[in-house]
Structures are given as structure tokens and as C-alpha cells.
Amino acid sequence: MEHPVVSTSTASPAIESQWQLLRRDRWLLSCLTWIPIALAVTIWWIFSQAIVRDLPVGVVDLSNSRLSRQLTRELDATSTLSVIRSYTNVAQASEDLKATEIYAYVVIPRQFDKSIYRGDQPQITTFFNSQMILVGRLINSAVVQAQSTFNAQIEVVKTLAKGQQTTLGAMSHVLPIRTQITPLFNKNTNYAQFLVSAVVPAIWQIAMVVTTIMILTANHRTYGLAIWAKTNPLSRLVATLAPYSLVFVLQGAVFLTWFYHGLDWPLHGQISTILIAQWFTVIACMIMGSLFFFISLDPARAMSFAAAYTAPSFAFMGITFPTSDMGLLAQIWRSLLPVSHYIDVQVSQASYGFDAYHSLASLWPMLGYLVPFGLTLLLLKKHLQADLKKRCAHELV
């Protein structure tokens, strides 16, 4: 398919020509406007409850005694668990767990109360689906909390039964050391604040890389490479992408305003420092999108490269899994993702309140994106020369 003959002035990648291009390409316009917003709002809506509460669990009470019912009440009293069903055998509870009607079930053994009275240590068993890592961790913590409370109550009663202690003295005897665990930087264990503030930048990175490919595809399809970049490939590339970089930075500023002003999440540092990091991230993402496009000038293949490159963005950020525990390949891949360097700045400002110098020091590795930028220019010139030779051969024929 031959490209339409367009004059140099018409093909100029100025704001006016790009606006005309956007008016013709509604899908590209959507990717620059409402689609990133819709994705961010959807992610927030999924985690909008913020704090995990009342996870449905079951209890297999094989003892059916006063103490087993007391333990069941302690499990239900935790803010994390809600005992919705009691079972007479393990098979029924196992089937409901497999059907995801409950997240876990607790088995209270036979003669549970008699074992306690005899001074034995009856074993309480909890089964849960360990594939749900977050849910499993919460259930484990809640069960331990309920069991500790139940054990303390039993020991207090035993101590009081000896008649030598007051209630306060019995509690001091049972719990000689009291602990206070204070979470820092996310005191309410708000999972929206924890996850959404990382997932949205990951989506933002994917959107920037993909949209950059779409921008270059639209310009290549409309003007042709020989007309679009004939005079000065570097200046044409920069002039074409510069207006869109402002759109990407605006998107980043919008979600920061939404996080720390709209949702009123804590911000201990300066939002201006995060905005500087966003500028570097935007440039790096546009470089990678350009590289993927000019590898083959095939938008479908470029999208495949972009998908493979950005897919593990959230997993490799180091938010839900420690970076130090990642394998060598994962750490290398993480260092290649712009958002991984950005998120270090965002966390250091939002949670720790570092000064700008120490936060922005995380961006030094991003100078490495000058390498793919140089490769992009080489590929662009190579394709341009090939296109010009093809046109000359066509004119001779």
C-alpha cells in the first residue's frame, strides 16, 4: 500500500498536524484520554474497601462442647474472620473450600474440652488455600490471634481457680510480657493505599509504551517514513513525541493528585519530587516504545514486544515481594523497567519523607536508556535509507 503524497509542511509533526491525526484515529485518542482513567478507577474500585474484613470461614466442631463453642466465638470475633458455617465432618468443609464458598476451615478435635481439663494440649488444625497468598496470611494471623486470646482466657480461669490471685494478678501471671506492635507508613493496613498506588503506575507505564507505538504507527501510516523523517530524523522524532509527553505527565499528575489530595492518603515528602521522577519515567517509556516500533516497523510485532516487556511491571516493582529475594533474572528485568526506578522515588517521598536528593538518586540508572535511544535512531535511519532506496527504484521503474 502506497502512502499518500503529502507536502513537507503538511507532514510537519507540529501540534496542529498531530491534532488532525488524533481526530482521525479515535482509538489513539481514547488511549490518551479516557482509557487510562477508566483503568485506574476500576483498579481503585476493586480495592476500594481498603481493609480486608469478615472473610467467610467454617468450623468443623467434632467436640461440640462449651469450650469449642467459645473458641468458635473467638474466631468470629476477629475483624478478619466471619464464621458462616459449622460442619459435622471434614469432607463437607473441604468441598466448600474447593468451591471457594469459604476461604478456610478450622477443625476442633474430639474431646477438646476434656483434653484441656486434663492439662493436655489439643491440636487445632486450620486448612486454607495457600494459592491465595494474601488471604492465607490474613487467615493465619487471625487464627493465631483468636487462639492466643482463647489460651489466655483458659489460663486466667485456671489461675483464679487456685484462689490465690486477683483477676489482674492472674492476667499478669498468664501474660508476664505484653507486646505492642505498631505498623509504620500504613497504620491502618489500607490495601488500597498499598496496592493501588503501585498498580496504577504500572498501568501508566504500559499505557505510555503502547500509546507511543500507536503514535508512531499513525504517523508512519499517514505520512510515510520518507516524508515524515527525511530532513532530520532526530528532530522529527522528538517534535512528534513532545506534545504527547505533556499528556503523559498530565496523566501522572492527575493520579498523584487523586491519591494524595482526593483520597487523602498520607504524603510525608514533596509531590514536586515525584513529578520530576515522572518526567524521567515518561521519557524512558517513550524511548522503549519507539525502539520496539522501529525494530520492524510492524505495529503488531511492536505491541508483542511491549506486552512481553511491561507485563511483569507490578510483580517486579518490589512492592509485594522483596527485591532482595528476587532471582538474578528478575532483578535484571526490574532494572530495565522505568516504573521500577520511579516507584522507589514515590515510596521514599510518600512513606518515608526523604529529601529530594536522596530520593532522586534512584533515577541515576535511568541514564542507561540512552542506549536504547541510540539504537532507536540507528534503526530509524536504517529504515529511512531502505525506504528511500525503494522509492528511487520504484520511480526508475
Image: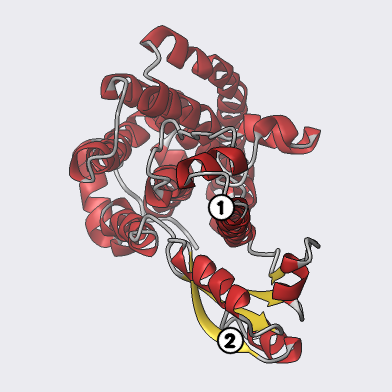
Q: CA distance from mark 1 to mark 2?
A: 32 Å
Q: Is residue 397 visible?
A: no
Percent x, y of residue 384: 55, 36
Foreground pick, 56 / 111: 111
Residue at 47% in and 32% down: 343
Residue at 54% x, 72% y is: 70
Kind of residue sitting beneath label 2:
Ser
Query: In which quarter of the view is residue 115 placed?
Result: bottom right
Q: Position of residue 209 (x, y in %)?
A: 48, 44
Figure check: 119 above or below 295: below
Q: Secondary structure at mark 1?
A: helix
Residue depicted at x 37% and y 11%: 356
Q: Secondary structure at mark 2?
A: strand
Asked if 184 appears above or below 109 in the picture, the reply is above
How many neighbours does mark 1 have within 10 angstroms: few (below 14), some (14-19), or many (20 or more)?
some
121, 291: nearer the viewer: 121
The residue wearing badge 2 is 86
Q: Residues within 10 Å of mark 2 (few under 14, many from 20)?
A: some
Q: Nearer the viewer, residue 155 or 214?
A: 155
Mark 1 = which residue? 160
